[in-house]
Image: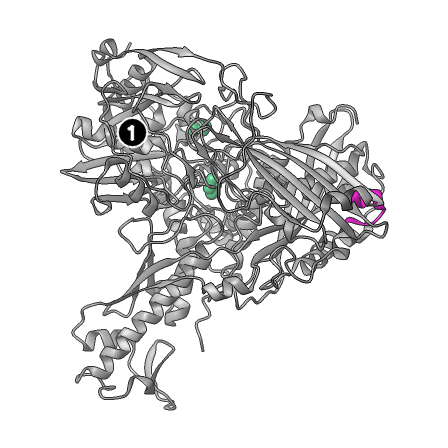
Amino acid sequence: MTMQAIGKPHSRVDGRAKVTGGARYAAEFNQPDQLYAVVVGSTVGLGRILRIDAGAVAQMPGVRAVISHLNAPRLAYQPHKGGTDPANGERLHVLQDDQVRFYGQPVAVIVADSLDHAERAAAALAVSYAGETPVVDPLDAKVQPVAPQAGRAGADRSRGDADAAFAAAPVTVEASFDMARENHTPMEPHATIAAWSGDRLTLWSKSQFVVNEQAEIAAIFGMPAANVQVICPFVGGGFGTSLRTWPHVTLAAIAARQVGRPVKLVLTRRQMFHTTGHRPRTLQRVALGATTDGRLTSLIHEGSGETSRYEQFVEALTSTSGFMYSCPNVRTRYRLLPMDTGTPTFMRGPGEASGMYAVESAIDELSYKLGIDPVELRRRNEPAIDEAEKLPFSSRSLMQCYALGAERFGWASRDPRPRAMRDGRLLIGWGVASASYPCFFSPASARVRLLADGSAEVEAASSDMGPGTYTSMTQVAAETLSLPLDKVRFSLGRSDFPATPSHGGSQTMSSVGSAVRAACLAVQAELAKRAVADRRSQLFGASIDSVEWREGRLSRKGDAAAGPSYSELVTGAGGSPVEAGASAARDAAIAKQYSMHAFGAVFVEVSVDPDLGLVRLRRAVGAYGAGRIVNPKLATSQCIGGMVGGLGMALMERTALDPRDGRPVNAHMGDYLVPVNLDVPHLEAHFVEEQDPHVNPLGVKGLGEVALVGMAPAIANAVFHATGKRVRELPIRIENLLDV
Amino acid sequence: MIAPTPITLTVNGETVAAQVEPRIHLTDFLRENLGLTGTHIGCEHGVCGACTVRLDGEIVRGCLVLAVQADGKSVETIEGLSDSGALDELQAAFRDRNALQCGYCTPAMLLTAHELLARNPTPDRATIREHLSGNYCRCTGYQAIIDAVEIAARARAGAKS
Ligand code: FES
Ligand code: FES
């Protein structure tokens, strides 16, 4: 009997800690003698600091330091770019000069002996500026689009002649889309506690990428990475905002060094809208040409996204347009819009979520023009291979997703005419859209220790912002070692653990999971090697090829008798733990042979109140082809959470900037709307059976992102079906629908 | 007024005497002064519910109550309610249904659900949604939370019958 830990709906192993308040997040590692730091942000959106009146504030009760560019240490800011940092440009150098590049940029940090004293002093600090009006609106004529220098997505791609084909097409759709800036708004604010001991620095810091935070802080301070330790066992939601090391981490470290004591710095909710990244606002144009029987002849997708003046934030806005549909003539174009704002960053489903909103909306529009059901239209244009890369898909179950989703949703009974379905006075709309996200697999490492009691300790730097890294890695180790789950203890969130890639891009299961599996196999190999060489072992003298692991016991091949267990082997060898580490990475040859993506189909029903313009989501079904599902209970939960993120994108989330100074005017949770319990109807997430031997050794494709992609266009399409009005901006708000 | 003020209150059954700054709210007091970090801070202004605690038996938003206002009162937090077993069925159901991901909203969600079940032992799903709508969760999509509260309600009813 194998353990079969993988594929089972185990309850999360960190559940007890989280339901009792025992899980400790970054701000909850208070240190002895700790002081408190509060950031002072710029109140102009562009310009120069003229004066900082630190003297008066320094005399206030409890204040230990007032640090600004006037007295901050000059930091090394050595070059460093981790996988989640923009490839081009240079990060903000905090408190190094008098320049203000965007509203809310940190201009000072106050350290005091209590939070109250620090807040008082921060509020009292007088800073005067020579301010200018920043450019913060992508539609501002002063914005100069630039081609990105490099990044995940090639800027411009073309096959065939898309413009000529569009001009010649008998049926066309052409539409422009405007998607709002979003802020990740996790429930836990960013927080860092910094403590120096001589030249060594420990940071308890909210991070989805502790090894990069270690490397980044080391580079900023010009110190060896080995002298920086980053600790983050729990992340209270991230969605991408903790992928980079933002200026507050540096500020906490500066402050702690200045006062010679540990310092805690927690961003306020308002500051979470200033300097910790955001999903960029995007402007897009899609032009489709088709034959009258619904074959695409042209697909043009042009998009641009906001970035800062000092870094090029690049996301895969147009990349799925090359392979979602079979089409001989495709042209994509991607530009950046540098403005006076902080640098955006990856937010759940980065690029794909925004880009597919536009294209999936346009495809829907085309379906009405053609009089072809939108599911059928997608079926008619389903490609056999990735026509952009001219590679087969490692697996692609999009049509199976549509079949499963349509059946669960009851799509067949849809009246295709807009405004035809009603519930009393409410207009009802049904909409559908595709989802896709790439299957990343980045180099990762892990280590395993087998203890004398027969249990295993597994470690990887990694992170768990909620999806269940603790649980899924425990399952992978338990399965590989044939141990029960409670004999495995998986630890993460320390930069001195084996390095892993960022906890983003839906690659944790594939990358860290593969590394954990490899490390388990390595520790088994190590133990076997020792057993056959150890005179005290019953397997002494056997050739290494003649033994094998069966059900956690080292047995002779062909011999039904079970050999010694982990506990017996470790104890027999003296009892010291046996440890091994291993790494995993994608086979470069396979990467060249296959196009690897997860796919999904999302079906939704909305109601629109014709008098109030109010849209409500009434139900949704998501069907996903995401390879092997390691834990159906956690996976379903992750998908439903992602769908609700897409609901927020469709109907609520929007960071609005004051054009006069770039201030986010709704920088708090009262006015930055996110879905609450009453906004969410019955949701279903289903998985199609999919085996993909190519993506990674575990056959997993990742779920976190694909679950959000597709939801917003499905809702927008349903709003059209309900009302007959095509809204081409997100979020769709009451004011968009007052005339329906 | 910035001078520390003496207060005496009961926290999870134990008497606590402290000098507190008048501006410090109850949640910061619990977290920073008493180390009771199971109560979280999300929005800082009464919107998200992450800071929920019980004050003289009623749930309140700890970010909207000053620590000095708790003088003479009894405060219960997730730590105390967990130890007492008051949340057993809810905690078991939350774990079983995966009604949490990052877990940051969870302690407050449990306290709010506990209050609902105390008032209405058999709420329907719409009632649960309504009651929990002041507690934000950015991760789970809420559905499993509703499931868990329903299951816990049934478990409590079963335990009593
Ligand atoms: S922190 Fe108190 S309600 Fe959000
Ligand atoms: S579980 Fe993360 S906010 Fe609710």
Could you say where residue B138 lies in the image, as x and y percent from the top left? 50, 39
The residue sitting at 69% across, 55% down in the picture is A405
Question: Which chain letter matches label 1?
Answer: A
Spot occupied by residue A209 in the image (x, y as percentages of width and height): 37, 46
Q: Is residue A540 above or below residue A239?
A: below
Q: Nearer the viewer, residue B89 or A461?
A: A461
In the rendered image, residue A370 lying in the magenta stretch gets the answer yes
Q: Is residue A710 above or below residue B74?
A: below
Looking at the rendering, in which quadrant would you find the N terminus of chain B? top left
User: Secondary structure of the magenta portion, mostly?
Assistant: helix
The answer to whether residue A510 shows anywhere in this view is yes
Residue farthest along the bottom direction in this orientation: A559
Q: Secondary structure at mark 1?
A: helix
> What residue type is disc 1 on?
Leu
Give the left or right position of residue A647, taking residue B153 as reference. Answer: right
In x, y percent, where is residue A736? Answer: 71, 26
Foreground residue among B35 and A41: A41
Q: Is residue A428 visible?
A: no
The one of A459 and B84 positioned closer to us in this rendering: A459
| Residue at the (57%, 59%) spot, across then down | A595
The colouring scheme, among rainbow, by chain, secondary structure or one colour, is one colour
Q: Which residue is mark 1?
A: A251
Of A39 and A312, nearer the camera is A312
Q: Which residues, given as a range, are shown in magenta?
A: A366-374
Q: Is A702 in the magenta? A: no
Residue A85: give x, y in percent of width and height: 41, 41
Circle 1 residues within 10 Å: few <14, some 14–19, many ≥20: many
